[in-house]
Image (spheres, grey):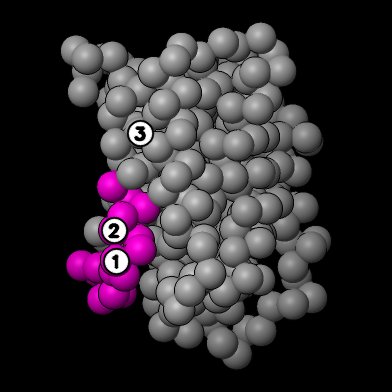
Amino acid sequence: MRTALLTAAALIGFAANSLLTRGALGHDWSDAPAFTIIRLATGAATLALLVRARHTPSAEHGRWMSALALAGYAVAFTLAYTRIGAGIGALLLFGAVQVTMISTGLLRGERPLGRDWLSVALASAGLVWLTLPGTTAPNITGALLMLAAGACWGAYSLAGRTSGDPLAATSGNFWRATLLGTAALAFLVDTSSLTWRGALLAAVSGSLASGVGYTLWYAALPSLSAWRAALLQLSVPVITALGASFLLAEAIPSRLLVAGVLVFAGVLLSLPSGRR
């Protein structure tokens, strides 16, 4: 039950990140570089305060390789949302996460059952349907950026499966990622495009949806196999698409609906019958 609750809360945080990012960039309340830097910095500050408030020694301090993956994800993720919608972006993101994590799990000796492969096939079919050429196919540059973000996030999630102190590890990763992200994007920031609304959404994305959400995810990961962690994340596009419809007034094309149904069916099939 603890793992299920941690996972559910983290997945909601992931969907919130998509919506907050798309909301800020889609309304021109911030440019992508400034949003990313504020997001990383506020996440690092929030986590540092939480680590300090618990008054217990930190068992971990983060790693530069994990921070590089986190920074790569954050930069590509935000730039991608200047070109594609929240729902489609989330499907592409977690499709790349799925490929990265399941492939790595197989190389490390994980052997999913037949039902698990069927789950992967259903979810993958949804992603293939989404990216077929057509009038509602996503912008190619935005799609490639989101796929890169997914690969980075998959690597970051795999690193978290060995975490013994999720809060401290995430905190250490965030301040390192802030340095890397700022170094990569500082010269691209257009301060004239940053509004207080954009800064606020970036701060909420960084402190709550990212900082707290990623800590919960790191806490759940040691109890999840690589393939199941990847597949569970594919439920995020469904949450994101619904949120985009209600909160951002984004249209939901039929292609996204069909893809979402296939992905969600695959996720449900992967769960034990008693947990569906």
User: How far is mark 2 from mark 1, CA to CA?
Assistant: 5 Å
User: How far is mark 1 from mark 3, CA to CA?
Assistant: 19 Å
Q: Name which residue lies at 31% across and 55% down.
A: 258
Label 3 belongs to which residue? 266
Residue 131 in magenta stretch: no
Q: Name which residue lies at 44% across and 70% down.
A: 85
Q: Is residue 24 visible?
A: no
Label 2 belongs to which residue? 257
Please state which amino acid type lies under the numbered disc 3.
Gly
Q: Are marks 2 and 1 in contact (CB under 8 Å)?
A: yes
Residue 235's disc is none
Quadrant, the N terminus: top left
Q: Is 195 above or below relative to 98?
A: below
User: How far is mark 2 from mark 3, CA to CA?
Assistant: 14 Å
Q: Position of residue 145 (x, y in %)?
A: 65, 62
The span picked out in magenta is 245-261
Please state which amino acid type lies under the numbered disc 2.
Leu
Between 255 and 96, the residue placed more toward the observer is 255
Quarter assignment of residue 250: bottom left
Q: Principal SS element in the magenta part?
A: helix
Sequence-wise, which precedes: disc 2 or disc 3?
2
**In this rendering, would 33 be left or right of 121?**
right
Label 1 belongs to which residue? 254
Q: Name which residue lies at 42% across and 40% down.
A: 123
Q: Position of residue 23 (x, y in %)?
A: 39, 72
* Secondary-structure class at tag 2: helix
Please state which amino acid type lies under the numbered disc 1.
Ser
Q: Are marks 1 and 3 in contact (CB under 8 Å)?
A: no
